[in-house]
Image (cartoon, rainbow, N blue to C red):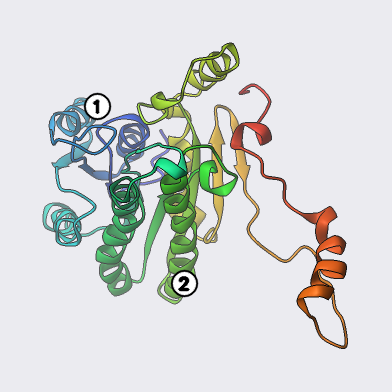
Amino acid sequence: MSGVLEDKVVLVTGAGRGIGREVAILAAAEGAKVVVNDLGGSVTGEGQDTTPAQDVVKVIEAAGGEACVNGDSVADFQAAKRMVQQAVDTYGKIDCVVNVAGILRDVIFHKMTEDDWDSVIQVHLKGSFNVSRNAADHFRAQESGSFVHFTSTSGLIGNFGQANYAAAKLGIVGLSKSIALDMARFGVRSNCMSPFAWSRMIGTIPTKTPEEQARVERIKQMTPAHIAPMVVALLSDKAKDVTGQIFGSRMNEQFLFSQNRPIRSVQRSDGWTPSTILEHCLPAMKASFTPNDRSGDIFSWDPI
C-alpha cells in the first residue's frame, strides 16, 4: 500500500459489513487509524449487535493497523457526537468521515407507511447530517477535513419501490454540496459516492423472473471491495482540489455523475399564461425532457 492516509483518523459509519467494512479495512491499510462504527442492526433497522464491528477491528489489527469499535446509532444526534468524540479521545483528532450507514424499507409508494418513510430518512439523511455536523466543528478548528457521503442511483436516476431511499439519497447530494460550499473556506471537502456492489442491502432485489435473476447475478460480480479505492482516494490530501462532486464505482469502472443544470429555456416578451405554457413552452421543451428511466436502464451493460 502507498500510505495515502498515513496519520489520518477516519470515522466510517456502517462499517461492520459490506461496503463500510471494505472502506474501513482499506483506510487502515493505507495508514489511517479507524473508528469502526456499526449499530449492528438488521437491513430494515431492527436490533443491535457490535460483533460485526468487532470483527472488522480484529481484521485491521491482525494486519498491523489501529482501529476501535463504536456501536452508536447515526440516527441519534448525541450518539453521533459521541462517536466523533471517541475518535478525538482515542487518537487525538478526526480527519475524515465516511457516511455509509443505512437501512432499507422497500415498498411501492402507494403502500409505503409513515414509519417506512421516517425510518429510512432518519438513518440515511439525518444520520449523514448528524455525523457530519458533529465532525464539522473539529474540521473547522483544524482547517482541514474530508467527507464522503453515500448516495445511490436510486435517487440520481430512479428505481421502483424506493421513494424513501431515493429521497434520502438525493437529499444527501444536496447536503454534500452545501457542506462543500459552506466549508471550503476552512479547507474542508465533501463528495458523494454512488456504489454499484452486492451487499445485504441489495439482497432485497426481487428475483422472480429470469430477467431479474440475471440482473442479480451481474450485480453479485460487483463486490464491495471495488468501491473502497475511490472512497479512500477522496479522503487523501492528494485529492485536495476535489470537492462537491458525485462519483460512482462499478467493478473496474469509475464514473463522474452530472449535476442538475438548466438544459433548455423558452422566453416570451409578453409573459406567460397557463394556456401559452401549454401551447408553447411545454411542447418546445418536450424533446429535452429527461426520460423516466431506472438505474438498470442507464447502466445496461455488464460490469467490466
Nearer the camera: disc 2 or disc 1: 2
In three-dimensional space, the C-alpha distance between marks 2 and 1, rounded to whole angstroms, equals: 35 Å
Between 297 and 77, the one nearer to me in the picture:
297
Q: Please state if 100 lies on the left or on the right of 292 as rendered.
A: left
State the residue lying farthest toward the bottom. 270
Position of the N terminus, as image quadrant, is top left
Q: Earlier in the sequence, mark 2 or mark 1?
A: 1
Q: Which type of secondary structure does the marked residue at label 2 adopt? A: helix
Between 293 and 229, the one nearer to me in the picture:
293
Residue that appears at 28% across and 48% down: 115
Between 94 and 48, the one nearer to me in the picture:
48
Label 2 crowding class (10 Å Cα cut-off): few <14, some 14-19, many 20+? Answer: some
Q: Which mark is residue 63?
A: 1
State the residue lying farthest toward the top. 210
Q: Which type of secondary structure does the marked residue at label 1 adopt? A: loop
Q: Please state if 79 lies on the left or on the right of 164 as rendered.
A: left
Residue 38 on image: x %, y %: 21, 40
> Please, what is the three-letter code of the amino acid marked with disc 2?
Ala
Examine the rendered structure and indicate whether residue 56 appears above or below residue 126: above
Residue 293 on image: x %, y %: 66, 40
> Please, what is the three-letter code of the amino acid marked with disc 1?
Ala
Position of the C terminus, as image quadrant, is top right
Disc 2: which residue: 184
Examine the rendered structure and indicate whether residue 194 appears above or below residue 277: above
Residue 137, picture quadrant: bottom left
Residue 110 on image: x %, y %: 45, 44
Residue 192 on image: x %, y %: 48, 51
User: Number of labelled discs?
Assistant: 2
